[in-house]
Image (cartoon, helix red, strand yellow):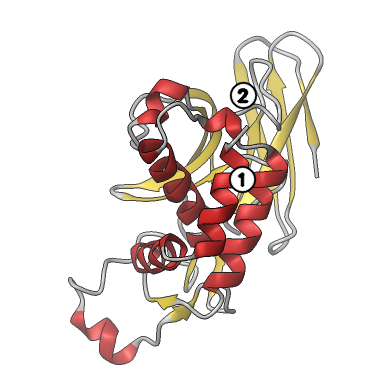
């Protein structure tokens, strides 16, 4: 749901995080001279609640002793014990056209709290429904992203796969851009990928990102939905 930050003092962002499990309550103030600013909230979901676990190729013991986590299984939880930077970004049409987001404009940023939750103020007039709004959690070369389609959404291997597939679609369909995808279509794509990925598994964030992306790329249903969404 949308929560509001109140503005009071200039140019200071104060976030107070009071959490209780995955349904955390997030409170805060944005100082900037008066008024209220809505926020986007969500959780960063990772296998075994660990965002930056090293890949299996570097830790062969993981294969032997750590069972893989299902993409939508109970082993994938909001991250614990890590403070990961989460940013709200605006991606321009030219930036997305080559399939690699290199120069997004920052709208706001925060870090996850102890329960893996974040709150990102919609500053500068940004609003849910604007095309090209992107949430990104990143640590080193590991990242999870989601195109914004509602004001309370999680980052996961599913959302990352949707981002990758849309960017890939733009590369192979010149003339289309992120504004071709409505919030309803982004939600439908996310739901479809989630249903296809239910039984896919991996040990790390990178593992799950790869396997979910592969399943999605091979799905005729996803390709059809992309075609229909980007046609207008």
Category of crowding for the residue at label 2, using alpha-carbon neighbours closer than 10 angstroms: few (below 14), some (14–19), many (at least 20): some
Sequence-earlier tag: 1 or 2:
2
In percent of width and height, residue 211 lies at: 38, 69
Figure quadrant of residue 120: top right
Question: In this view of the protein, can residue 132 be seen by the observer?
Answer: no
Q: Report the front residue among 15 and 85.
A: 85
In percent of width and height, residue 180 lies at: 59, 32
In percent of width and height, residue 143 lies at: 39, 50
Residue shown at the point (67%, 41%) measured from the top left: 149
Question: Mark 1 highlights which residue?
Answer: 228
Mark 1 vs mark 2, foreground winner is: 1
Image position of 203 (left or right of 179): left
Question: Mark 2 highlights which residue?
Answer: 13
Quadrant of the drawing holding the C terminus: top right
Residue shown at the point (19%, 73%) measured from the top left: 57
Category of crowding for the residue at label 1, using alpha-carbon neighbours closer than 10 angstroms: few (below 14), some (14–19), many (at least 20): few
Q: Report the front residue among 228 and 36.
A: 228
Residue shown at the point (55%, 46%) measured from the top left: 227
Separation of marks 1 and 2 at Cα, in angstroms: 40 Å
In the displayed structure, 103 sits above or below 171; it is: above
Label 2: which secondary element: strand
Residue reaching furthest bottom? 64
Image position of 125 (left or right of 50): right
Image position of 79 (left or right of 41): left
Contact (Cβ within 8 Å) of mark 1 with mark 2: no
In the displayed structure, 138 sits above or below 213; it is: above
Quadrant of the drawing holding the N terminus: top right
Label 1: which secondary element: helix
Image position of 188 (left or right of 53): right
In the displayed structure, 211 sits above or below 14; it is: below
Residue shown at the point (60%, 59%) measured from the top left: 115
């Amino acid at each position: 749901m949308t929560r509001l930050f109140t503005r009071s003092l200039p140019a200071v962002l104060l976030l107070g995080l009071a959490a209780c499990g995955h349904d955390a309550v997030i409170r805060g103030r944005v100082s900037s001279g008066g008024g209220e600013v809505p926020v986007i909230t969500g959780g960063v979901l990772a296998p075994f609640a660990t965002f930056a676990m090293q890949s299996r190729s570097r830790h062969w013991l993981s294969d032997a002793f750590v069972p893989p986590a299902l993409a939508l299984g109970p082993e994938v939880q909001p991250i614990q014990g890590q403070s990961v930077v989460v940013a709200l970004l605006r991606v321009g049409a030219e930036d997305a056209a080559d399939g690699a987001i290199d120069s997004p404009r920052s709208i706001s940023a925060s870090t996850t709290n102890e329960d893996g939750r974040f709150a990102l103020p919609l500053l500068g007039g940004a609003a849910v429904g604007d095309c090209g709004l992107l949430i990104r959690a990143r640590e080193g070369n590991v990242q999870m992203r989601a195109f914004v389609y509602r004001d309370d959404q999680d980052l996961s291997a599913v959302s990352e796969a949707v981002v990758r597939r849309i960017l890939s679609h733009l590369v192979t369909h010149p003339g289309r851009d992120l504004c071709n995808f409505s919030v309803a279509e982004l939600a439908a794509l996310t739901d479809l990928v989630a249903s296809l990925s239910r039984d896919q598994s991996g040990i790390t964030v990178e593992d799950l990102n790869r396997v979910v992306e592969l399943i999605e790329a091979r799905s005729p249903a996803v390709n059809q939905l992309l075609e229909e969404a980007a046609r207008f």
